[in-house]
């Protein structure tokens, strides 16, 4: 993958201030799309690095500096997620297979090469993770959440989340995201969206299968437990898929994992 020639602390930051006054450590309330129009919708052919920096500044106005987001609110952190995962998401938004109008609008007219550049940029950002969310769960629910994540539920054919997301839950290159450092509301919404068919991954969509097998009360236990886990300093996605996945012993087949 070609390296992205862009200094995020230079032009990108300056451009953030110039084009998106809402940039702040906490995610801003979603601005009306038209307020970002100077940063997007510019011609693509021959666009300069500065043009890309302006587009990235539009992203960080919602996703926070470097895409770090915060555990409050709803917006997901995009910093440090595997590039292949981010790229898959941007394509799903563009094609409306992940139905979030504001994100579809952001990437609507952008070609694959451009989406890949943005994915690579955010994948290379590693700002510190915020403190975990304080989630009020009774002890039994918390333990149920931990068990589901680490061992699954054989009675419902739900595999352990760690089987694919890794024992550290930090995800794996090229396209499995980590599950830590995300707001509980966001995690709930994703599992709900898969159940309802408004989030689709590259087929076969293993996450849709898993989300539909989960009991509704178990979703809150899982997401509450996940959102309250601390993220170790220097956390990174694993360099390769988990061994079981590589050995074709994956509990379910997932699409989109080829580099
Ligand atoms: C107006 C606010 C807003 C702007 C601007 C914005 N996003 Fe988003 N983005 C969202 C929201 C809200 C979600 C969560 C969608 C959901 O519920 O599935 C999201 C989700 C995402 C995701 C999926 C994250 C994951 O973990 O699956 C990616 C990737 C992403 N955005 C990238 C970008 C990029 C790149 C840009 C700039 C081109 C951008 N966003 C601009 C609001 C925004
Ligand atoms: C068989 C492998 C596999 C297993 C097991 C698995 N996942 Fe996933 N998960 C994936 C893949 C692949 C993706 C990326 C999907 C995409 O591209 O949209 C993903 C994405 C996700 C996301 C989206 C993250 C984001 O940033 O939007 C959530 C949430 C999630 N998984 C939760 C879970 C939970 C909870 C479990 C356990 C109950 C679990 N997963 C088990 C493979 C798996």
Image (tube, helix red, strand yellow):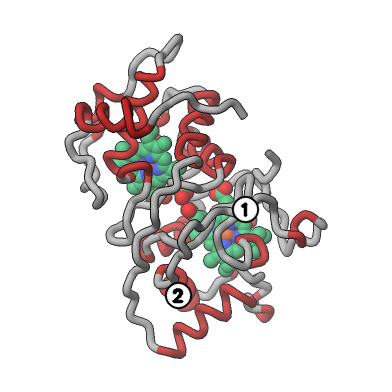
Mark 2 Cα within 10 Å, few/some/many (few <14, many 20+)?
A: many
> At x 49% / y 40%, what residue is drawn?
124
Mark 2 beta carbon near ligand 2 (under 8 Å): no
In the rendered image, residue 13, in percent from the top left (x then y), is placed at: 28, 32
Alpha carbon separation for disc pair 1 and 2:
20 Å
In the rendered image, which quarter is residue 19 located in? top left
> At x 46% / y 32%, what residue is drawn?
118
Which element is circle 2 on? helix
Residue 199 sits above or below residue 107 on the image = below
Number of the label disc, if any, that sits on residue 4: none
Residue labelled with disc 1? 172
Question: Split into 4 quadrants, where in the image is the N terminus?
Answer: top right
Return the residue found at the far top: 46
Residue labelled with disc 2? 225
In the rendered image, residue 160, in percent from the top left (x then y), is placed at: 64, 71
Which element is circle 1 on? loop
In the rendered image, residue 204, in percent from the top left (x then y), is placed at: 68, 49
Return the residue found at the far left: 21
The answer to whether any part of residue 146 appears in the image is: yes
Question: Split into 4 quadrants, where in the image is the C terminus?
Answer: top right
* Left or right relative to 131: residue 85: right
Q: How many marks?
A: 2
Q: Are marks 1 and 2 in contact (CB under 8 Å)?
A: no
In the rendered image, which quarter is residue 150 located in? bottom right
> At x 46% / y 61%, what residue is drawn?
233
Mark 1 beta carbon near ligand 2 (under 8 Å): no
Q: Earlier in the sequence, mark 1 or mark 2?
A: 1
């Amino acid at each position: 993958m070609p390296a992205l020639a862009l200094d995020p602390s230079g032009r990108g930051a300056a451009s953030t201030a110039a084009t998106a006054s809402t940039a702040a450590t906490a995610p801003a309330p979603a601005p009306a799309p038209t307020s970002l129009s100077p940063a997007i919708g510019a011609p693509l052919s021959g666009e300069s690095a500065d043009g890309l920096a302006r587009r990235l500044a539009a992203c960080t106005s919602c996703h926070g500096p470097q895409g770090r987001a915060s555990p409050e609110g709803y917006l997901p952190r995009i910093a440090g997620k595997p590039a292949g995962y981010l790229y898959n998401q941007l394509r799903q938004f563009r094609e409306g297979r992940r139905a979030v109008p504001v994100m579809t609008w952001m990437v609507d007219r952008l070609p694959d090469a451009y989406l890949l550049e943005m994915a690579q940029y955010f994948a290379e950002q590693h700002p510190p993770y915020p403190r975990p969310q304080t989630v009020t769960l009774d002890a039994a629910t918390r333990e149920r959440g931990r068990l589901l994540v680490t061992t699954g539920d054989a009675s419902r054919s739900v595999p352990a989340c760690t089987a694919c997301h890794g024992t550290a839950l930090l995800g794996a290159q090229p396209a499995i995201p980590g599950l830590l450092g995300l707001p509980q509301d966001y995690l709930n919404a994703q599992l709900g969206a898969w159940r309802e068919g408004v989030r689709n991954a590259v087929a076969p969509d293993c996450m849709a299968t898993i989300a539909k097998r989960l009991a509704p009360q178990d979703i809150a236990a899982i997401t509450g437990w996940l959102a309250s886990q601390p993220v170790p300093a220097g956390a990174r996605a694993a360099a390769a898929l988990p061994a079981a996945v590589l050995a074709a012993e994956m509990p379910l087949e997932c699409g989109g994992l080829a580099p």
